[in-house]
Image: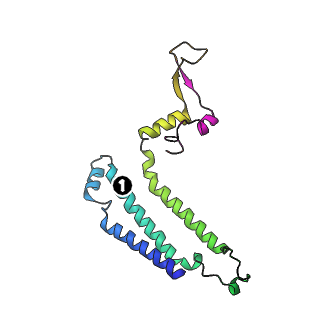
């Protein structure tokens, strides 16, 4: 089992290395010149940076998984080694050390993904995301055609309740949870 897991992970690592070698690099001269001239990065720059750094970080994690395969890959269970009667198919419960290793790796991956996405937080929202945010979370101005206490055509702010925010969408597309 460990040899199979390591072989599969080694094939994934080889694919990532090939991607890193063949893909455009984030330190390409055009990207550096745009930054030096004070121009904003283009979509292509973000894609190149995301693919390259994501691949590099992914390679580190795959190599960590290869190195620690002995901790998280179980062997074939036998009746004599597990103390169970033959015929009982129960999954092996990982020991505490293996669970802690998995939790630490998951938290590290989450932190690395956050660090990778952090530079894009200052960018504006796209049109559909902006619409979803305004329509489902913030509220919006509406004309007073339906409002009983206001004159026709006068704008008023339509506040949204939490129930409307969570469940008040007519279609499944462009809900704030999807953005």
Q: Is residue 165 magenta?
A: yes
Q: Secondary structure at mark 1?
A: helix
The vertical placement of 120 against 18, above or below, is above
Q: Is residue 149 or residue 111 the one in the foreground?
A: 149
Q: Please state if 156 lies on the left or on the right of 122 as rendered.
A: right
Q: Please state if 7 lies on the left or on the right of 100 as rendered.
A: left
Q: Please state if 51 lies on the left or on the right of 100 as rendered.
A: left
- Other residues around mark 1 within 10 Å, as few (<14) / some (14–19) / many (≥20): few
Residue under numbered circle 1: 47
The image quadrant where one finds the N terminus is bottom right
Chain part drawn in magenta = 155-176
Residue plotted at (37% across, 71% down) = 17
Residue plotted at (54% across, 44% down) = 177
The vertical placement of 20 against 176, above or below, is below
Q: Percent x, y for residue 77? A: 64, 82
Q: Quadrant of residue 106?
A: bottom right
Q: Please state if 89 lies on the left or on the right of 13 as rendered.
A: right
Q: Percent x, y for residue 111? A: 52, 59
Q: Percent x, y for residue 60? A: 45, 70
Q: Is residue 94 magenta?
A: no
């Amino acid at each position: 089992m460990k040899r199979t897991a390591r072989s599969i992970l080694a094939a994934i690592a080889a694919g990532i290395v090939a991607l890193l070698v063949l893909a455009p690099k984030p330190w390409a001269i055009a990207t550096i010149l745009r930054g030096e001239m004070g121009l904003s990065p283009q979509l292509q720059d973000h894609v190149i940076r995301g693919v390259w750094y994501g691949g590099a970080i992914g390679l580190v994690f795959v190599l960590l998984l290869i190195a620690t395969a002995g901790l998280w890959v179980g062997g074939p269970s036998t009746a004599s080694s597990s103390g169970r009667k033959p015929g009982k198919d129960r999954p092996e419960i990982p020991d505490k050390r293996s669970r802690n290793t998995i939790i630490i790796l998951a938290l590290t991956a989450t932190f690395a993904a956050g660090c990778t996405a952090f530079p894009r937080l200052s960018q504006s929202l796209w049109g559909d995301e902006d619409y979803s945010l305004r329509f489902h979370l913030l509220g919006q101005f509406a004309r007073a055609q339906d409002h009983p206490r206001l004159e026709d055509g006068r704008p008023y702010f339509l506040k949204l309740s939490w129930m409307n925010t969570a469940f008040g969408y007519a279609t499944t597309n462009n809900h704030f949870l999807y953005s």
